[in-house]
Image: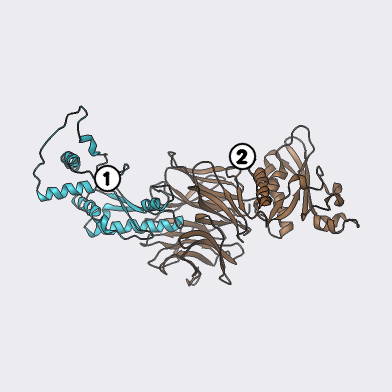
Chain colours: A brown, B cyan
Amino acid sequence: MKRIAKSLICLLAVLVLPAKAALDIVITEGVDAARPIAVVPFVWQGAGPAPESISDVVMSDLTRSGTFKPLDELSLGQRAISKMDEFNAAAWKNVSAEAVVMGYVKPYGAGKYLVSFDLVDLVKAQMQSGGPQSRSELLLDSRETVISEAQFRQYAHRISDIVYEKLTGIRGAFLTRIAYVVVNHQEKNPYRLMIADYDGYNEQMLLRSPEPLMSPAWSPDGRKLAYVSFENKKAEVFVQDIYSQSRTKVTSFPGINGSPSFSPDGSKLALTLSRDGQPEVYVVEIATGALKRITNHYAIDTEATWFPDGKSLLFTSERGGRPQLYQVELASGKVTRLTFEGEWNLGGTVTPDGRSMIFVNRTNGKYNIARMDLQTRFMQVLTSTRLDESPSVAPNGTMVIYGTTYNGKQVLAAVSVDGRFKARLPVGQGEVKSPAWSPFL
Amino acid sequence: MDLNKLFKAIVIAAPLLALGACSSTSESETDASGSTTSGSEYGSGAGGVEIGGANPVLSPEEQQRLKFQELRKEHIIYFDFDRSEVQTEFAEILEAHGTYLVEHPNVRVLIEGHADERGTPEYNIALGERRAKAVAKYLQGMGVLPSQMSIVSYGEEKPLDMSHTDEGFAKNRRAVLVY
């Protein structure tokens, strides 16, 4: 127990210090299950103080992944080493970690820097301790790149991606963004649509409005966002290019225009319209505006998202009396009910591998994020926070970001898809909601 | 013409409000004409004098009209969790609004539907719309023209109470009539 507390304090120190992030992370659970890894602080080979620390970003990324637990600096076998040649296996004999990341940064002409890093298999090095050491056998990866001053964080995320993929076999999702809505009712224009790097850095405002903004959804190329805006005192769906800032109104029918979701090929949006009297799921072709009605029931049908193959939609329907999740095949219109456990199941999204879905489950009046295996129908509640909503899955399928309530405020939180790792992303002002994790960028 | 009538009604009604017991109104509410009328303004004078007077003799129609006038100051009706039926306790308020709208067919009303913050935002948009529609249907049943009414659902996006408690949830599950 004491150990947990101690490691938590260490983590907090590491994670909270770079306070430039708009969303600082507080890991609440799952530190013990993480795999130890050694990240040696990258050596700065220039004059004067070092620019932004790449190894700090890498350590922070690996910690946030929930999979790894970087050792603190005092536990490292060697410090101030920057490449494989300087690695001495004997010095690492008693260090329990599976790999060592090391590297250096040096000036490379005006405003440019050379970044180099090596990833060493420590388990193998320890097994061969005393015996012959073959450099190529131990070196899992090694790269050298020239970057500009503005690219430090971006390239650090790239290193994290490589380390993560080498050690887990799963693509890293550190070079991604999140979109979310911030609401501050004290302000004249309380609603803001924001995007930031996945770790909360480089926060940027896309839209500010006196009326509600809802349900941001990324295009598959990570270039556009679809969202709902009430700026004209009614719900309308817009698509906005995040680079050119151009935006198009996609639908503005009487009643609800909501819950947009891009098709996997990016050409269509699934959305909810109530022009027929009750909320129904539609698919609209973005270029032409051509509409196709998908559901047809007097009960509420809404919150459609795409299966990765683009052939069916997952949606919430009240046709069984209470909100539950259903699948509709687009070609045949065939509808299948997927959830039966718990009082309500709604707001579903299929994981990128197509094998499971993440959604909001209500059991005994409590709203939590749950996962269900689509094959076995085994359901697991992942969170124990309050009033959970709006789950969005990372593009590598390992982590879910969602909206919840903490200390009377709406905040964002994250949970790993196995439910072991839990973290909170508190913010300074206002309420934060409707997170959407971008595709790989 | 309409406004003039309305103004007269307020002039008659205001002293009555002061004499009779004021029904409780929340601070954000406004009268149908758009002006905030607070009863206390017409109570005992600022200079310490008290003004007396007799109740005017009212016909039953006038009495009914004044009662509705008073009821129309309530613009919000509340709903049970996950329900969209109009509760009987709010029927009188809707009747007051309905009667007024039938008598004034060129007056338009916007009915906003709202939900509490439980569940998902988009499901709550659907729920809010159902509540707004239940109110519209009720008013239509009284003879209000569909062309006089428009509806919008804000779901859980515009809460009245931010406490995230059961009392707060109850205040947020509402339909609001906006003239």
Chain letter for the residue marked with disc 1 in the picture: B
Q: Kindly tell me whether residue A134 is visible in this rendering.
A: yes
Seen at 72% across and 45% down, the residue is: A55
Residue A205 versus residue A389: which sits nearer the camera? A389
Q: Quadrant of residue A138?
A: bottom right
Q: Quadrant of residue B84?
A: bottom left
Q: Kindly tell me whether residue A348 is visible in this rendering.
A: no
Q: Amino acid at mark 1?
A: Ser
Residue that protrudes farthest toward the top in the picture: B47
Q: Position of residue B68 (x, y in %)?
A: 20, 49
Seen at 13% across and 34% down, the residue is: B52
Discs 1, 2: same chain: no
Residue A20's label in the rendered image is 2
Q: Position of residue A219 (x, y in %)?
A: 56, 54
Residue B157 versus residue A27: which sits nearer the camera? A27
- Secondary structure beneath dot 2 equals loop
- Secondary structure beneath dot 1 equals loop
Locate residue B96 relative to residue A307 in the image: left or right: left
Q: Amino acid at mark 2?
A: Lys
